[in-house]
């Protein structure tokens, strides 16, 4: 079985989509009967180890992202590869190129709905624009042979706007990269903090939907004895005294160290499609406090963290205080166990192979070889 993935959501500082595709490419490489090709935008045509670069111009001030403008290079690359199945990972030109290739190759196409585009457009332009985008999404994803969504919350949104044949397929976590063993006991000292200070962390982009101002107001409520470390690009520069900022992209191994070294992760975003950083923190043995919205209701059990009212800094501060009155060592162990049981990449890839086999009408083995773990 030859699977081809394609997306424009792939850049040096990419988030969850690149993490998903890179992990998937590595895991599928150890299945003897599976070939995986990954098509991503680049400066020109090229290929290495099953990753194919397709020409696309850079997005100005886009942190390395490129926006494809022509269907033909993507369709032609797919035609030359002739996969058995195509997965489209964004709702833009590459998705239409995949559908165009389907007509030439007579192969099924799956659409993975990674981001809530109507909501993002509504936030930036207005509700009227979001409604128009819903119509576009309904039309586009109605053409796919199967639609995958990373959470039940996302699947329900798609069904509400008229998309059918939607299936929930959670993403996974690199359990070796994000591990309690990466805890750095010297981090608090490096930040100028005492060991008794409760160190909180948030890692990700400082984009509007992450609701960073809510975190800052939460820290003002918490005051002395609590400190927040903001990690990622586009973070605010004017912050309370009990907040530190690392305003740049960090490699995963460094993010893993910071997550494992914090006492808790906090997340105020109320529009998350999945919330990968939540699971990365939990895999690191770090409990979480997040808002009761989006996919967080699905991925954070009570044994691993607390949920609070969205857009309410006082409610978040109260939840943080409550967290530190609980059995934190027990929550750390529970968080790690929960991710190991449900979000290991081998489990995720086995689920994906099940979707692919169903669409192709074939039977394939979905158990990874014993040495695949890691």
Image (cartoon, rainbow, N blue to C red):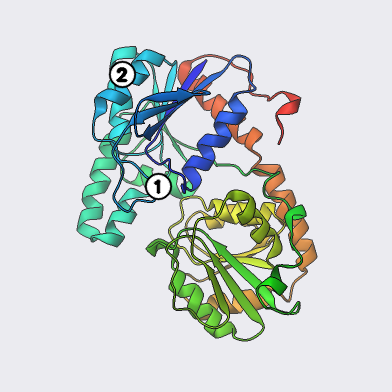
- Figure disc tally: 2
Other-residue count near label 1 (Cα within 10 Å), few / some / many at <14 / 14–19 / ≥20: many
Helix, strand or loop for disc 2: helix
> In this figure, which residue is indicated by the disc labeled 1?
115
- Residue 319: give x, y in percent of width and height: 61, 74
Tell me the quarter of the picture where residue 224 sits: bottom right
- Residue 5: give x, y in percent of width and height: 44, 28
Q: Which residue sits at x=56%, y=64%?
A: 202
Left or right, residue 104 beside residue 257? left
Helix, strand or loop for disc 1: loop
Q: Can you tell which mark lies on residue 14?
A: none
> In this figure, which residue is indicated by the disc labeled 2?
76
64 w.r.t. 323: above or below? above
Closest to the camera, between mark 2 and mark 1, is: 2
Tell me the quarter of the picture where residue 174 sits: top right
- Residue 267: give x, y in percent of width and height: 53, 65
Instruction: Decide which of 35, 269 is in the foreground and name it.
Output: 35
Q: CA distance from mark 2 to mark 1?
A: 26 Å
Give whichever of discs 2 and 1 has the lower sequence position.
2
- Residue 133: give x, y in percent of width and height: 25, 47
Can residue 151 be seen? no
Instruction: Decide which of 97, 323 is in the foreground and name it.
Output: 97
Q: Which residue sits at x=59%, y=85%?
A: 223
Instruction: Decide which of 254, 264 is in the foreground and name it.
Output: 254
């Amino acid at each position: 079985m030859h699977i081809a993935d394609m997306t424009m959501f792939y850049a040096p500082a990419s988030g969850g989509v690149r993490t998903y595709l890179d992990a998937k490419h590595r895991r599928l490489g150890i299945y003897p009967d599976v070939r995986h090709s990954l098509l991503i935008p680049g400066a020109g045509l090229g290929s290495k180890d099953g990753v194919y670069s397709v020409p696309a111009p850079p997005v100005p001030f886009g942190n390395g992202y490129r926006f494809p403008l022509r269907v033909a290079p993507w369709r032609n690359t797919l035609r030359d590869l002739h996969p058995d199945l195509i997965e489209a990972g964004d709702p833009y030109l590459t998705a239409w190129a995949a559908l165009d290739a389907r007509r030439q190759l007579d192969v099924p196409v799956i659409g993975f709905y990674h981001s809530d585009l109507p909501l993002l457009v509504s936030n930036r332009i207005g509700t009227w624009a979001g409604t128009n985008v819903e119509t576009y999404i309904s039309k586009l994803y109605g053409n796919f042979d199967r639609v995958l969504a990373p959470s039940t919350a996302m699947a329900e949104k798609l069904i509400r706007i008229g998309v059918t044949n939607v299936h929930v397929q959670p993403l996974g976590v690199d359990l070796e990269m994000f591990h309690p063993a990466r805890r750095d006991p010297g981090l608090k000292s490096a930040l100028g903090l005492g060991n008794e200070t409760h160190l909180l962390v948030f890692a990700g982009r400082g984009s509007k939907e992450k609701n960073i101002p809510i975190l800052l107001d939460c820290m003002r409520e918490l005051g002395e004895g609590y400190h927040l470390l903001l990690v990622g690009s586009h973070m605010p520069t004017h912050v309370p005294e009990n907040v530190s900022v690392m305003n740049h992209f960090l490699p995963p191994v460094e993010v893993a160290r910071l997550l494992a070294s914090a006492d808790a992760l906090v997340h105020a975003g109320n529009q998350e499609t999945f919330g990968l950083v939540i699971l990365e923190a939990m895999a690191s043995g770090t409990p979480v406090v997040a808002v009761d919205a989006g996919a967080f209701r699905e991925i954070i059990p009570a044994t691993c963290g607390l949920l609070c009212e969205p857009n309410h800094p006082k409610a978040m501060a109260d939840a943080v205080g409550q967290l530190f009155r609980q059995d934190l060592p027990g929550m750390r162990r529970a968080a790690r166990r929960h991710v190991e049981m449900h979000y290991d990449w081998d489990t995720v890839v086995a689920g994906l192979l099940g979707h692919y086999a169903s669409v192709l009408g074939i039977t394939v083995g979905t158990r990874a070889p014993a040495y695949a773990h890691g």
